[in-house]
Structures are given as C-alpha cells and as structure tokens.
Amino acid sequence: MGIVLDNSERHPGHAIWYDMLKDGERVGHMTCGAWSPRAHSMIGFALVGADRAVGDKVDVIRGGYRDPATLCPLPFF
C-alpha cells in the first residue's frame, strides 16, 4: 500500500522506517519516503496489516512530530 503525507512540506527522502499510528496505536510503518513533484507531497510505502484500507487516516511519527497522512493504492498514479 502507499501513503501520502497530508501536508505539502518538502522533506528529504528517507530509508528509515517511521512508525504509523491510528488512534494512538501503532498500525505499521512508512518506508522509503520521497518528495513527489506530481503529488506536491511526500509519498512512500506503507507496511500495514490486512485490517487497514485505502483512505485510512494515520499519523506518521517522524523526529518526534506527528505528520497526518492517508493510505492510498499503488501504483500512485
């Protein structure tokens, strides 16, 4: 599954696995994040359980901050 951060702030790409939370509970990880000029947002891969669905809202914990994000289908476009 893919993930798109809801804000349009550009961050450096990463290969770090960041925790993803839903209602305060860890539901997976965001991996391989990169800036998408087409989406005007950060995108990455989401490793989540089968109980997660496209459109689910999650928080990515990055450097002590919570970045709101949305799970999306692959390929991105």
Image (cartoon, rainbow, N blue to C red):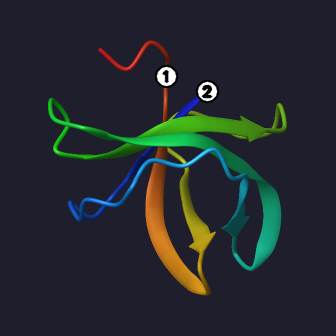
The alpha-carbon separation of the residues under discs 1 and 2 comes to 5 Å
**Residue 27 has which mark?**
none
Residue 52 against residue 74 in the figure, above or below: below
Residue carrying label 2: 1
Query: Mark 1 touching mark 2, by CB under 8 A?
Result: yes
Point 49% across, 22% down: residue: 73
Point 77% across, 40% down: residue: 48
Point 57% across, 68% down: residue: 59
Quarter assignment of residue 12: bottom left
Disc 1 marks a residue whose amino acid type is Pro
- In the visual, does 32 lie left or right of 43? right
Q: Is residue 3 visible?
A: no
- In the visual, does 67 lie left or right of 61? left
Quarter assignment of residue 4: top left
Q: Is residue 14 visible?
A: yes
Residue carrying label 1: 73
